[in-house]
Amino acid sequence: APATAFGTVVNAPPAVIGLPTVQVGRDDTIAAPFRSVRLADPDEVQMQTVRVTVGAPANGVLTQLGQGTYDRGTGVYTVMGRADDVSAAIAALRFVPTRHQAAVDQRVATDFIIGVQDSTGAMGAPATTRIMTVQTNAAPVIRNAAACHVAVPGAAIRPFAGLLFQDADVAQVATLTIALGDPAAGTLTGTGPGRYDPATGRFTSTGTVAALTVEASRLAFTAGSGASAGMVDVVFTIDDGAGGVARDTATIEIASATVGAPRMETDPVAALFIGSAPTTVVAVAPASASLLTGTAGRDAYFLDTAGGAQSSAVTGFVGGDLLVLWGFRAGISRYSWSDDGLPGQPGRTIQVDGRGGVATSVTFVGQDAADTDRFAISSGRVGGLDYLAIAAP
């Protein structure tokens, strides 16, 4: 603004007024850090150029830009105009903080600098403010819980291999509880730090969501030898201790073993039987596989195995039966047929190179080449697991 000193007109630089030194916000709330800011210059006809700089662009972005321009990469907002117009544009700016940059309840500091220059080149003193953004809590999330898994008394399965726990908060520690609807239905065992209480049917563990996901995936459910056939509800609860809780459910079906049905004797393979099945059809799985349910209308059998080379036999493989060999990698694995059979169990044998190069052979007892030529063979991928499916016509 012009002023007279000893007969000479001197331009006074503009000034930014009304900017608080420190402000406090939340990472889930849009802030209005410049709502009280006003640009002062006695010479109202002068044009002003104002730059608002976000000290750490990764901490958030400016919105409601009005007639100004904003570079997200550098965090610089620029606006030009008369003092009143520029003041209104700056006051309208909003700051949207980046969420979950630090642990819950910690504060992330973001500095802002407002610089102003009038059309004569006179620059006002920079004005600064700091927003302390409190990190708020986000509830954890449970994914891929809803599923029905089949178990047989005495055989262990890993029904939670596809379960996923997520939490947007940084370094958040949570408590996981997996509760069986009927504690007498079976037990949960694992290799992690969690503990299972057979009296209540509750498994509990504490850790990061990543660690809990891994631990849950390795849990084994073993149906009790005297468990009745039927559905068992499983309730997952994850509590982050800061007010965020997520719950979801799944079911485990306990099926009866077929009375008198021949079992696969090759250790460490454990066969699973469906009570209504007229024949014994078995699926071989790699150590990382979990039990999956079969296609509706077909007899599908799945087991979890400790891995290694396996030789197994299937008897009574007739129309409508389905054998699934988990670990077959389409385009990589190979399979071939032979008439070798197993000692005392002659038949047609298929040998498959599975995951990690482990060979699996299954003999279809009593079948010949004419029978196996009619089998429908397909491969694919379900739930992250590769398979080879063999169906009897």
Image: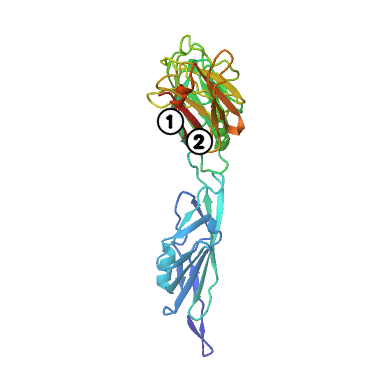
**Could you tell me which residue is drawn at 56 percent across and 61 percent down?**
55
Give the percent coordinates (x, y) of residue 259: 46, 9
Residue 214 in which image quadrant: top right
Give the percent coordinates (x, y) of residue 4: 50, 86
**Could you tell me which residue is drawn at 50 percent across and 15 percent down?**
153
Residue reaching furthest top? 260
- Marks 1/2: CA–CA distance: 16 Å
Give the percent coordinates (x, y) of residue 77: 48, 66
Residue reaching furthest bottom? 7
Secondary structure beneath label 1: loop
Amino acid type of the residue that numbered disc 2 sits on in the rendered structure: Gly
Residue ID for mark 1: 146
In this orientation, which residue lies closer to the viewer: 217 or 325? 325
Compared with residue 21, is residue 184 higher up or lower down, i.e. above or below?
above
Secondary structure beneath label 2: loop
Kindly tell me whether residue 41 is visible in this rendering: no
In this orientation, which residue lies closer to the viewer: 158 or 232? 158
Amino acid type of the residue that numbered disc 1 sits on in the rendered structure: Ala
Q: Residues within 10 Å of mark 1 (few under 14, many from 20)?
A: few
In this orientation, which residue lies closer to the viewer: 192 or 157? 157
Kindly tell me whether residue 356 is visible in this rendering: yes
Mark carried by residue 384: 2
Q: Nearer the viewer, mark 1 or mark 2?
A: 2
